[in-house]
Amino acid sequence: MPDSKPQIRFRDPQIEMAHGAGGKATRRLIDGLIAPVFGGPLLEPLGDAALVETGGACLAFTADTFVVKPLRFPGGSIGDLAVNGTVNDLAVSGARPAALLVNLILESGLPSEVLAIELRAIAAAAEKAGVQIVGGDTKVVEHGAADRMYITTSGIGLMDSRVRCSPASVRPGDRILLSGPIGDHGITILLARGEIELEADLCSDTRSVFPMVDALMSIGEGLRWMRDPTRGGVASALNELATDARICIAISEETIPVRDQVRGACELLGLEPMHIANEGQFLAVIARERADEALNAVRSVPGGEGAVLIGEVREAPKKLVLSLSAYGGTRVVDMLVGDPLPRIC
Amino acid sequence: MPDSKPQIRFRDPQIEMAHGAGGKATRRLIDGLIAPVFGGPLLEPLGDAALVETGGACLAFTADTFVVKPLRFPGGSIGDLAVNGTVNDLAVSGARPAALLVNLILESGLPSEVLAIELRAIAAAAEKAGVQIVGGDTKVVEHGAADRMYITTSGIGLMDSRVRCSPASVRPGDRILLSGPIGDHGITILLARGEIELEADLCSDTRSVFPMVDALMSIGEGLRWMRDPTRGGVASALNELATDARICIAISEETIPVRDQVRGACELLGLEPMHIANEGQFLAVIARERADEALNAVRSVPGGEGAVLIGEVREAPKKLVLSLSAYGGTRVVDMLVGDPLPRIC
């Protein structure tokens, strides 16, 4: 008798860094092991916020873990990421962030001042994002059983009744919106580690995207889908959408904003900017007839001036992301494979 | 001009294991650093569930991190704790657990089978506790940057309208209820590490206490306060109550159930059973006139047969927990100092 639950089909013998990188190996772990064990189709996609209806309220509920190395980098720190990352997961789920919990794993011997600096960063980022920290938990492990500190931030938000985004709402002809330049966060972390001989005037883009998303939600049902392209980058986020919605996404390569410093570092290191993690950008799919209005809404918000339309949804070839160059070339944009930049968030 | 926010007064130069043990050092870290930075009096007590009112619903929202060593032990595993610990935090806040998120930090090189076993333990514990796992997140760190796996479980629940517990509701004359024998979890972990020459037929008490709490909530407003005495044990939980409610708690030492194996191990090692962590027990304060009814309600639930009344609330001496022996002696029961059993949950 066939079992309606998805089968466990994860055959990797051990966990590797790539399983945490947000690309193909992560998808294999989630779809092949975690989702089948936890109940499969009942489950909201792992990595996004889950929708929970309780007590008459429709809530988004999410939690993200942060293990970024180093703790501090140009433009931010683990404390900033821990707030903005969870706030952004709520925002792109179509929710107004309401409350956060902050859970810490601390390595014994961590200087108290390092902790105090990150707690202040968390408090400041939460205030800036307009969300309240309502509690948390702290665990300490032996020296050598963690790398200084790890943070898990849980968040709940109230779903905005103006929109209900999902891959199932996406239609051929819809347009793809990107909020700004890509790759800043990942390349900033890479340079902050000092492992490569390269200097660039570059900052992480960590920030709350809620103000931009809030403006975008004013277009109502014309907004089909949103996602923040963190681990695995824009390429992985669009590939997940193409797979889940069983459509094709065609993007115009030259419309995607990439700073010179990011493009230069990627060329030098053989990396693809569309695979690099972002912490303060989002992607959205918009009905064709509302695309200009959506773009203007995002651009009207401080920080959203760099938003662009980068492509469109097509009927076929299904489950593929295609990149079209101005010279007529077409290439397939695949998900991230392996983990070129471990512990990016 | 006086600042109404609590002042930072944490002077320990670095983080030590004791800061995560649930006793005096933990309280010093939370009250002296975390709460002041995160906003002080606005904040729900860290370590409990926070109450969040949103969209017309009154919710409990909590997250606990688990770093127990070893991963598996008689009676359970980190996966069981990760579900039951969060379910119990919701339950003793007076909420019906609704949904959980499971966040993993995995050490690179972890055998996939070890992960699969814990995922199955999580799924089984969630099913048994009647709560749904709706999502999560997975991060991988380098070999040596974590000890196999750590889990953070976030939970939301709907507040039960029959009760509203808080330290402020506690009155002199109220009775103290304990759900069963103490110290089983902590001593089981200690023995499972094999570091001491002692064998005992003992299991962790990890379980959901929600069925017992649900029965107890039938007494309505006569239920004043609840807490699950995990890290820091019964002594630390009662001391926190005595401090927060500015009352005295007087307990009759011989009414507290302690298994012979736990008492024996504690005597041998110079530990106090009331400082040992529990994972499947709870404490409650009940109005005097409803105490027998409350006891019967808990005892009527399978697993609650061992519930007892262990003492009462007194007017003074404020902020103290006193233990009265049958021979007329009185001693002060202090919070846990230091961390005799690191990484107990």
Image: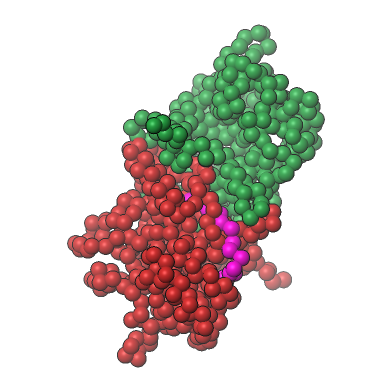
Chain colours: A red, B green
Image position, residue B65 (x, y; %) = 51, 45
Image position, residue A304 (x, y; %) = 40, 68
| Vertical arrangement, residue A71 with respect to residue B231, above or below | below
Image position, residue B162 (x, y; %) = 74, 41
Query: Between B236 and B83, which is closer to the camera in this rendering?
Result: B236
Is residue A326 visible to the viewer in this orientation of the structure?
yes
| Vertical arrangement, residue A80 with respect to residue A137, above or below | below
Query: Between B271 and A91, which is closer to the camera in this rendering?
Result: A91
The residue at 63%/44% (across/down) is B90
User: How many labels were placed on the picture?
Assistant: 0
| Residue A162 among magenta residues | yes
Image position, residue B211 (x, y; %) = 73, 42
Is residue A232 visible to the viewer in this orientation of the structure?
no
**Span colored in magenta:** A153-165
| Residue A89 among magenta residues | no
The residue at 33%/32% (across/down) is B13
| Vertical arrangement, residue B177 with respect to residue B322, above or below | below
Query: Between B195 and A58, which is closer to the camera in this rendering?
Result: A58
> Within the image, what quadrant is residue B215 found in?
top right
Q: Quadrant of the N terminus of chain B?
A: top left
